[in-house]
Every structure is written in structure tokens, then in C-alpha cells.
Image (cartoon, coloured by chain):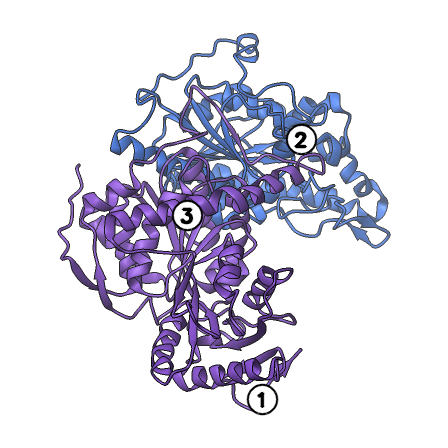
């Protein structure tokens, strides 16, 4: 078992040796790079990483350059989970056969997929990896849209959001479906550990990720990743949007242990109205027109009900 | 826990699936990531049983689809070890995206394809549509005509594929049911002989070498993609054919069994020839022997290596032939058959005056009878006598209804 890295403060954390280099092509203000750095900097152990096709991949491994100072693989859109599961299987095999080049290491196997790659096209692959309980961590960089290809809706896109394939218009308020509950689905796999995280709550994130690293078996992490380009906010406001997402409880921070035990890990002192979260983003701008305003109230009700549901589960230990 | 070796008789009675599973066991594959599908399922089941009985030390990952099977193989191969799987037909079709990715990333992976028709209509029997589906995917492709060859070619495939000058994935084809489920005598190697032939896997650019981090599966656009693909093709055309010849020679030294990229049978003085693949090769050989007794100068070529296509060997083998038939066991979908095209390409711009005709046969497991083959040689004889192709260039044989002929 490897030692858990001790992190005292944000300054020290943010200046940790980077295995994900700042030299990448992600948009200014993109939360992906912040989340990935926070996760990788949470450990000193060796890393074997994968990424699905998407923003993170196309912006960090454009031949002949790479932003990764760690082993890294990309295959396709839907299979970064199974890519890392295959690598983990090889690690186990070579360890068993005594053929590892550096047998004293404790590598961490992490797959990064966007919400399109995770909620939609790669769901089956993730399910397989979780069911087989590979010793790996799957991380969703959840920006609630196919951002890399220009903002098409995914099954993570929330209701009322204007996406290019569910655009708001004179007779449409945009996306019609509710966001898929991927945490619930992963919880139903009864995996050792699943958690929802946000880049602004970095201590909470590090704690969960380190717990994930210390866990033997499959770990699922869903990270909210505010997208300056598709959510339509100023690049300097990424952390503000992240704060609004957690403090409005639109994106509650909690964990599910063995699929049975829910712990809410962050309770905002001052809960922000959902309206403020929506108002900060261009993708919800049309909701403030008279004809669609009723949706804001519905949003608040849905968030309140979900929060109450999580609290009931936490209390009942189910 | 150390794994157990298996004592084999010199000759075992195995079907093609079991022969392939035994070869994977003997090669001590580090990771098998697989998903079952008829008729390749017994390879996966056989390997699972070996694992359960402690004859396999490596990891065996039963995934949830063929796409995931190959995705797992790619991750495992990039991590740095020996990797194999098996599939057929629809499974291969689901897997195709990842076949191109594996080849593009130059990862040595061994894939047993037990050939089966592609739906629709759904069909579980043997034809070569799945083989043809991935023929341009960049994989080396061998074709086994019997369980013995399925066994031997697995070992040869590992040897070629894992060579550091090659680093290309390889497919071993065998006919669904006719090879995969038909038990025959198979001359075996001992576990030690087999493993020593392939040797311990030597990693290159392995993700598990933490002192040398490597990025696999990058993005290239119009600036580099073409050079990348061109280099792969160049290696397929120049380096890999020689490596295959070398592996065939090494295997002959070990086993006494000689393989060739183009398997010629009674071709030395033949005037008429059939070129085909799979179990049909053995059927045609039998007919050839019978016709030879009647004094007909006929021969048959079995294509052992489908990719890289052995252009020069085909041209050499056919240079004195008067009339040749290319037998394609796949619906051509509005074109000439693959073998017809490749043979034409091999001989065009040569001095050959060969008359070439193409035949589509055996789709969905339809039998190719000895009578079909005799009729075919008679047509070739008529063509040779007339000095021109008297029929249409493309005909269907063995299909009910009015005669189908085109081109």
C-alpha cells in the first residue's frame, strides 16, 4: 500500500510537480485542466492514464507534442475505461509473473472521459469495468455537453439548456430531458466507492480522490467541469460558476460507499437560489424570458427534491 | 502460484477452436480480453477452463462486448505484454473501430477470427465476409485451412507480430464450423517447445515502464496522419513479408511443418488453377488429385497470407498458367471479389497471358461440392482452349435460381 500524500495548503498543492503540463490547448478558463491537475497532484505514485476522445484528449496529445509526463493512452470515444482496465489487467499479470520492470511501484490507473463519453457512448464500457471491479478510477469531466464538437446535447445536458442539437427557439426552451443520474447508476453497481466532486472544493476533491486511490477496486468520480465556451460565461469566472453549482445544490457533493452508504460531504452555509446559477450562464439565458420563466421554478423544485432525497438516503444509511 | 504444464500426446484430436486455445495457452499469453460469439466461443471457453484448472498464469478478462474485448487488448498491449483474443462475424463487425486503432498504434495483438457470415440475414455458418471486412485495417492476416494450421499459425503470428521491427497486430482466420468444430489429428509441440519458439514477450514503449512515460494514441491531422499511415503500409510491403518468411522457416526447423505465403499444390506444370482460401483449399486439392489421374494439368493455390498480400509470389506461381479462377467467399457488394482484384493486380503489367475469371461461392456456409469444382475446371479448360474467357468474368456457383453472371 502506498503512502497517502499529505497536502497542507492550496499554495503547496498548486505548486506540486505537474505530470499534466500547463502547455496544452484547452480553452482559457477550462475547468478540465484544473480538475485533472487536482487529481494527479493528490498522489506521488506512478500513473497510468487514459482519456476518451474529447476536449482533454485533442488538446493534450497533438503529435508530435504531449502534455503528459506520465504513461497515457487514448483509443476512442467510448473506451477509455476499458483501455485502462486492460492496462490494469496487464499490470496484475506481469506482477504475478514477476516481470514488472519496477516492481516496487504502486501505480494508479485513471481514466478520464467527458460526459458524452461517459453518460452516453461509453456507458456500457464503464459499466463493464465497474462490474468487473478493476483496480482503477474512472473520472467524468462533466461539462454537460459535447463541448469538443461544438456544443451538442448529451444525456448529461440539463433541462432547459440551449445546446446546438437542442437549441432554444421561439417555441422551444432547449433541452427537454432531465440530466441522467449517473452517480445513481454507478452506485447501483455496488462498487467500493463513488463520489461527486467539484474543482472549487479542492480539499473535498483531494480527500475523495485519495480515498479512491487507497481503495482496492473500481472507483467512480463525477466532477463538475464548468465550460466557459458552452455554458457561456467569462473565462475568469470558472471558479465562481463552480461555487454556484455546489452552493446552489445543483451539483451536490456526496459519496456512495459500496453502493449502500451515502454521505453528503458539503453543506453550503448559505444555499444560493438556483436562479442565480442559471442567470450566470448564457446557455440558460432564454429561461428568463416570460414564456419560459416557469422553468426556473421547476428547476428549484427539482434541486430541492434531489437534495431532500440525498439527505433521506444519508440518514437512512441506504 | 505457479501454473501447471500440460502433457500432450504427439497427435491430439482437436478441432480448430481447441487447437487455437491450446496455442494461446502454450504461448503463455499475459492478458486475454474476450467476449464469446458463435462459432469462436469454444476458444474463449477453452481458455477459461485452462485458467480455472491452473494451466494459465496470465489474466483472463471476460468483458461485455467485442468492442470492449479489443479495447482491453489495446490497453493491455500498450501496457507491455502478450495479448490475444478471438471473435467471429458480428463480433468482429462491432470490433472494427478498434482494429484500426490497434494497427494505427502498432500494438502486437493476436486475434483469432473464426470466419462466419455477416448479417442480414443472420447466419452462424462459415464464409469470409468477416475476414474481408477488416482486410484494409492494417492487420497482418493469416489463413488456416485446418485445425493443425490454426494451431501452428497462432505461434507463428505471435513471433511475427511481436518482432520489434514489425509491431503489427495479426489475425489468424479459420473457417467457422468446417475447421473450428471439426476434430482432426493435430501434431503438437510440447509446452516448452511452443513457448521457447515465441519466447518471453519483449516490451517496447510500454506504459508500465514508469521511468519512460509514453503517450499512446495521439491526434494527427493533415500535417502527420498521411506519413504515419504511409510508413505502416511501407513496413507491410517491405519488412513484414520477410519477417513472415523467416518465422515460417524457423517454425519448419522446429516442427518440420513448412508454411508458405502462397501454398501451391500440383502447380509446377499446371495449365489451369484455382485460387481460394480456408477449407475449400483442401476440397479443391482432392479434386485436383482426382483430375490429375485423368491426365488433366490442374493445380490449386491456397492463400496463406491475406495481408500483406503476396503479390510477387502469386505472380510467380501463376506465370505459366493459362486460365485461373479466383474463388471469393464473400458477397462482393457491387464489385469484383477481393481475390479476383488482387490477383488481377498481381499479374497486370506482367508478361502473363493468363485468363482470369472470378467466382462467388459458399455464402452463409453453402457447401462447395467436388462437382462444383470439376465443373469449374471444365470451364477453365474451355477458356484455355478458346484463348479467351467464354463466360462472364464473375459468376456465382452453388446458388439456387437462374444462373448469376456479371462483368
Residue at image mark 2: A226
Q: Does the image show residue B399?
A: yes
Marks counted in the figure total 3
Q: Are marks 2 and 1 on the same chain?
A: no
Q: Quadrant of residue B31?
A: top left
**Residue drawn 63% across and 81% down?**
B392
- Give the crowd class for mark 3: few <14, some 14-19, many >=20 residues within 10 Å: many
Colour of the chain lettered A: blue
Q: Which mark identifies residue B403?
A: 1
Left or right of A232? Residue A244 is: left
Residue at image mark 3: B244
Which quadrant of the rendered structure holds the N terminus of chain B?
top left
Left or right of A166? Residue A303 is: left
Q: A151 or A53, which lies in front?
A: A53
- Give the crowd class for mark 1: few <14, some 14-19, many >=20 residues within 10 Å: few
Asked which secondary structure carries label 1, the reply is loop
**In the rendered structure, are the residues bearing label 2 and label 1 in contact, judged by CB atoms less than 8 Å apart?**
no
Left or right of A218? Residue B47 is: left
Where residue B180 sits: x, y (%)?
33, 66
Amino acid at each position: 500500500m502506498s503512502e497517502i500524500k499529505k497536502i497542507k495548503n492550496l499554495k503547496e498543492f498548486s505548486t506540486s510537480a505537474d505530470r499534466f503540463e500547463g502547455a496544452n490547448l484547452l480553452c482559457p478558463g477550462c475547468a478540465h485542466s484544473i480538475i485533472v491537475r487536482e487529481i494527479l497532484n493528490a498522489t506521488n505514485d506512478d500513473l497510468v492514464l487514459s482519456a476518451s476522445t474529447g476536449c482533454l484528449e485533442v488538446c493534450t496529445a497533438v503529435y508530435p507534442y504531449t502534455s503528459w509526463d506520465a504513461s497515457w493512452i487514448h483509443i476512442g470515444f467510448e473506451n477509455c475505461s476499458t483501455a485502462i482496465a486492460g492496462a490494469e489487467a496487464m499490470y496484475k499479470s506481469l506482477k504475478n509473473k514477476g516481470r514488472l520492470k519496477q516492481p516496487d511501484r504502486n501505480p494508479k490507473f485513471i481514466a478520464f472521459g467527458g460526459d458524452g463519453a461517459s453518460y452516453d457512448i461509453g456507458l456500457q464500457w464503464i459499466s463493464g469495468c465497474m462490474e468487473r471491479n478493476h483496480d482503477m478510477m474512472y473520472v467524468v469531466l462533466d461539462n454537460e455537453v459535447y463541448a469538443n464538437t461544438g456544443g451538442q446535447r448529451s444525456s448529461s445536458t440539463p433541462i432547459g439548456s440551449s445546446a446546438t442539437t437542442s437549441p432554444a427557439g421561439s417555441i422551444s426552451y432547449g433541452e427537454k430531458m432531465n440530466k441522467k443520474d449517473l452517480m445513481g447508476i454507478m452506485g447501483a453497481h455496488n462498487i467500493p466507492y463513488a463520489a461527486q466532486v467539484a474543482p472549487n472544493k479542492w480539499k473535498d476533491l483531494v480527500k475523495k480522490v485519495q480515498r479512491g486511490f487507497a481503495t482496492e477496486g473500481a472507483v467512480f468520480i463525477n466532477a463538475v467541469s464548468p465550460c466557459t465556451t458552452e455554458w457561456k460565461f467569462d473565462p475568469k469566472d470558472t471558479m465562481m460558476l463552480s461555487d454556484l453549482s455546489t452552493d446552489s445544490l445543483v451539483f451536490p457533493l456526496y459519496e456512495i460507499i459500496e453502493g449502500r452508504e451515502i454521505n453528503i460531504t458539503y453543506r453550503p452555509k448559505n444555499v444560493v437560489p438556483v436562479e442565480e446559477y442559471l442567470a450566470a450562464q448564457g446557455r440558460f439565458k432564454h429561461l428568463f424570458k416570460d414564456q419560459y420563466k416557469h422553468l426556473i421554478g421547476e428547476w428549484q423544485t427539482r434541486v430541492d427534491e434531489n437534495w431532500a432525497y440525498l439527505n433521506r438516503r444519508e440518514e437512512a444509511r441506504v | 502460484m505457479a501454473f501447471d504444464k500440460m502433457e500432450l500426446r504427439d497427435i491430439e484430436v482437436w478441432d480448430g477452436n481447441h487447437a487455437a486455445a491450446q496455442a494461446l495457452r502454450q504461448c503463455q499469453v499475459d492478458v486475454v480480453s474476450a467476449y464469446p460469439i458463435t462459432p469462436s466461443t469454444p476458444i474463449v471457453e477453452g481458455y477459461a477452463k485452462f485458467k480455472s484448472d491452473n494451466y494459465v498464469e496470465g489474466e483472463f478478462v471476460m468483458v461485455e462486448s467485442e468492442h470492449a474485448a479489443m479495447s482491453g487488448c489495446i490497453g493491455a498491449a500498450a501496457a507491455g505484454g502478450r495479448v490475444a483474443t478471438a471473435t467471429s462475424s458480428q463480433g468482429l463487425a462491432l470490433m472494427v473501430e478498434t482494429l484500426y486503432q490497434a494497427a494505427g498504434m502498432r500494438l502486437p495483438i493476436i486475434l483469432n477470427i473464426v470466419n462466419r457470415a455477416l448479417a442480414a440475414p443472420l447466419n452462424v455458418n462459415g464464409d469470409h465476409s468477416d475476414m474481408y471486412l477488416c482486410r484494409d485495417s492494417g492487420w497482418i492476416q493469416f489463413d488456416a485451412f485446418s485445425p493443425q494450421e490454426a494451431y501452428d499459425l497462432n505461434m507463428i503470428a505471435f513471433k511475427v507480430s511481436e518482432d520489434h521491427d514489425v509491431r503489427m497486430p495479426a489475425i489468424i482466420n479459420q473457417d467457422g464450423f468446417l475447421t473450428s468444430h471439426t476434430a482432426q489429428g493435430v501434431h503438437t509441440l510440447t509446452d516448452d517447445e511452443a513457448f521457447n519458439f515465441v519466447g518471453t514477450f519483449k516490451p517496447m514503449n510500454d506504459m508500465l515502464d514508469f521511468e519512460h512515460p509514453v503517450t499512446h494514441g495521439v491526434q494527427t491531422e493533415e500535417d502527420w496522419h498521411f506519413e504515419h499511415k504511409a510508413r505502416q503500409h511501407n513496413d507491410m510491403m517491405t519488412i513484414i513479408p520477410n519477417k513472415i518468411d523467416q518465422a515460417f522457416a524457423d517454425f519448419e526447423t522446429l516442427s518440420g511443418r513448412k508454411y508458405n505465403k502462397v501454398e501451391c499444390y500440383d502447380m509446377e506444370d499446371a495449365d489451369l488453377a484455382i485460387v481460394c482460401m480456408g477449407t475449400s483449399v483442401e476440397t479443391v486439392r482432392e479434386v485436383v488429385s482426382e483430375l490429375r489421374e485423368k491426365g488433366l494439368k490442374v493445380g490449386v493455390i491456397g492463400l496463406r497470407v491475406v495481408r500483406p498480400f503476396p503479390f510477387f509470389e502469386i505472380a510467380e506461381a501463376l506465370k505459366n498458367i493459362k486460365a485461373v479462377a479466383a474463388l471469393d467467399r464473400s458477397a462482393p457488394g457491387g464489385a469484383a471479389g477481393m481475390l479476383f482484384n488482387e490477383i488481377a493486380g498481381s499479374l497486370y503489367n506482367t508478361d502473363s497471358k493468363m485468363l482470369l475469371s472470378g467466382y462467388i461461392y459458399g455464402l452463409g456456409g453453402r457447401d462447395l461440392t467436388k462437382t462444383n469444382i470439376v465443373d469449374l475446371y471444365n470451364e477453365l479448360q474451355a477458356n484455355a482452349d478458346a484463348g479467351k474467357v467464354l463466360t462472364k468474368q464473375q459468376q456465382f456457383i452453388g446458388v439456387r435460381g437462374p444462373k448469376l453472371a456479371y462483368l
